[in-house]
Each structure stands twice: as C-alpha cells, then as structure tokens.
Image: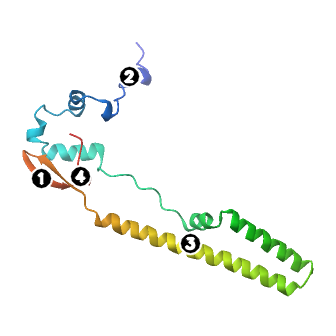
Amino acid sequence: MAPPKPEETAAVPVPPWHCMTKEECIKELEVPEDIRKKGLSSSQVTSRLEKYGENKLTEKEKETLLQKIWNQVNNVLVGILVFVAIISAASAIAKIGNPLNNWIQVGIIVGVICINTAIGIIQEGSAEQAAEALKAMLSADAVVVRDGTETKVPANLIVPG
C-alpha cells in the first residue's frame, strides 16, 4: 500500500484561541482542570517558552539610510523644486538669461532640498529614539501562578496555559 499523501495526514488546523471554548483551550494546551489553583510548573513554562516563544510583539524592520532619504524626498513639493532646478540648469547651459544667476538658483534649490532632508532624518531619528526610551521605561509585569504560588513575572515570560 502506498504511503499517504502529506495533504491526507495533515492535522486539523486549530481554530484561533478567541473562538475556542474554555474546555477546548484546556484540551489544546494539555493542562489539568485545576490549572487555576496550581498553575504551571517551571518545566512546563520552559517547554512552552521553547514551543511558543516569548510573549512580545514582532518589531518592524529598521529603515536604511537610503530608505529614510527616499521617504524625505519622495513628495510633490520636492519634485517641483527638482523640476525648477533642472530648468534653471538647462537655462544656464543654454546661456539663456544670466548663466551665473541660473547656477546660483540651482545651488540654492539643491541646498534647500539637502537641508530639508537632513532636518527630516534627524527629527525622525530623535522621535524613534524617544519612542525606544519610552518602551524601555515601561515594565509590564503580571502576577501568575507557578508551581502552586503566585509569582510576579515580566510580561514577555507569560506562556499559554
């Protein structure tokens, strides 16, 4: 007889936790009915930390410097300034009007764009640092029952069960 196909042996998907009844959760987590009195043992906590991971939100990837620069210059106003700078440079090259004035205009426009971009990146970095500092100052702790006694643990060490 041929071995079963992977699709045929796949386990029935577990519904989301919020859709389960109390009894279904207890069965899925393989905990005794009197879990509220005794809590989890230290070994159960360790195995569940390995299985489920820490209780924390995933952090978004940090933007690279090029992405930050692109986010600062990717807007209509900067596009208009670049367009005007190109027209001024073309006028200077074609010697339409006063070429010196046109090159000065190009320099001023490019300078304004660079200064605006630098200020935006610096402010964004300061805001990110402030948010990280606030996040570090917040200490979320929870009272749980472990090995039959109430214990205060950091929120990231809470496990299902």
Among numbered discs 1 and 4, the one appearing first in the sequence: 1
Residue 151 numbered tag: 1
Among numbered discs 1 and 3, the one appearing first in the sequence: 3
Q: CA distance from mark 2 to mark 3?
A: 55 Å
- Identify the secondary structure beneath mark 3: helix
Quadrant of res 77: bottom right
Among numbered discs 3 and 4, the one appearing first in the sequence: 3
Question: Which amino acid type is marked by label 3?
Answer: Gly
- Identify the secondary structure beneath mark 1: strand
Residue positioned 68% across, 80% down in the render: 111
How far across and how far down the image is residue 148, in percent? 7, 44
Location of residue 61 with respect to 148 vertically, above or below: below
Question: Which amino acid type is marked by label 1?
Answer: Thr
Residue 157 numbered tag: 4
Q: CA distance from mark 2 to mark 1?
A: 41 Å
Pointer 2: what residue? 9
How far across and how far down the image is residue 85, in percent? 78, 74
Residue positioned 75% across, 67% down in the render: 80
Question: Which amino acid type is marked by label 2?
Answer: Thr
| Label 2 CA crowd tier, 10 Å (few <14, some 14–19, many 20+) | few
- Nearest the camera: 111 or 55? 111
Q: Is residue 58 left or right of residue 74?
A: left
Pointer 3: what residue? 120
Q: CA distance from mark 4 to mark 2?
A: 33 Å
Among numbered discs 2 and 1, the one appearing first in the sequence: 2
Circles 2 and 1, Cβ within 8 Å, touching? The answer is no
- Identify the secondary structure beneath mark 2: helix
